[in-house]
Image (cartoon, rainbow, N blue to C red):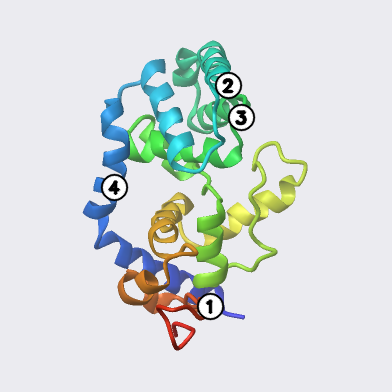
Amino acid sequence: MISMTEKQQIVKKALCELRKHHETICKFFAAVSEPLQIRNGEINKINLWKILLIDIQSRGGPKLEEHHIIELRKRFFKDLDLQKAKALEDQERFDYLYKIIVGLPKVGPKIASVFMKNLVCKFSIFPELKDKLFLPIDLHIKKILVTRLRVLGENEIRNGNPLTSTRRSKSMTCQEQLSRIHDPKVELDDFWYIGYLFCNKRSGLVCKQLCWIRDYCRQKYNTNRSRNCPQGRYK
């Protein structure tokens, strides 16, 4: 079992490596979002609707049929009151926006958390909410934190809704643990890029040769014997 200080150092060093590639990561996400002409800092429902759609599409959200999109759009424009959001204090504003988004059809806590993260961090809408953000927990993030960097145990990380889950105490414990490891915890979402590009089931060679944070990985990628790998495993 490694200490909290060791966990913090591992994460700090891995994030420092990621920051060396900040421009590359920005280009990756710009290629996804720029065609939608989302405007930084512009608070209106059309802009926020575009952010939500791109988050659902790019972060493994549900497949939406046309009737789902129509219902989702209807509820989004009906339920979201931006004037009310602007008038609230920071924590109340965050809670209000998060609850509206996570309450929409086909939207769960991961997509709602991704939406809040991109709203604040990528598109500079309500930037004062950065320290209120949750870390979106998905399979990529979980694999990096639990299996690769081993800063959290399997039983410590939860993907339940931190605000409304019946397992509230466990969900909050996870987010509090993440805050102890790194503040603001939402910055750990940069590891999603590593999981997506270097750490998926087809990435053995890429992991071995190119992964930016491989030096901090405590369980390197393994793959079964194949024609392209006569030794059978990558060390």
**Quarter where residue 71 is shown:** top right
In 3D space, how far apart are the residues under numbered discs 2 and 3 (Cα atoms)? 8 Å
Residue 112, how many percent across, how many down?
A: 54, 35
- Whether tag 2 and tag 3 are in contact, CB under 8 A, the answer is yes
Residue at the disc numbered 4: 28
Q: Circle 3 sits in a helix, a strand or a loop, which is it?
A: loop
In 3D space, how far apart are the residues under numbered discs 3 and 1 (Cα atoms)? 36 Å
Q: Is residue 212 shown left or right of residue 202?
A: left
Which residue does the image show at 55% across and 24% down from the upper left? 65
Q: Earlier in the sequence, mark 3 or mark 1?
A: 3
Residue 40, how many percent across, how many down?
A: 28, 29
Q: Amino acid at mark 2?
A: His
Q: Amino acid at mark 4?
A: Phe
Residue 101, how many percent across, how many down?
A: 56, 27
Marks 1 and 2: which is nearer the front? 1
Residue at the disc numbered 1: 224
- Say above or below: 108 vs 83: below
In 3D space, how far apart are the residues under numbered discs 1 and 4 (Cα atoms)? 30 Å
Q: Residues within 10 Å of mark 3 (few under 14, many from 20)?
A: some
Q: Circle 1 sits in a helix, a strand or a loop, which is it?
A: loop
Q: Earlier in the sequence, mark 3 or mark 4?
A: 4
- Which labelled disc corresponds to residue 106? 3
Residue 180, how many percent across, how many down?
A: 53, 61
- Which labelled disc corresponds to residue 68? 2
Q: Earlier in the sequence, mark 1 or mark 4?
A: 4
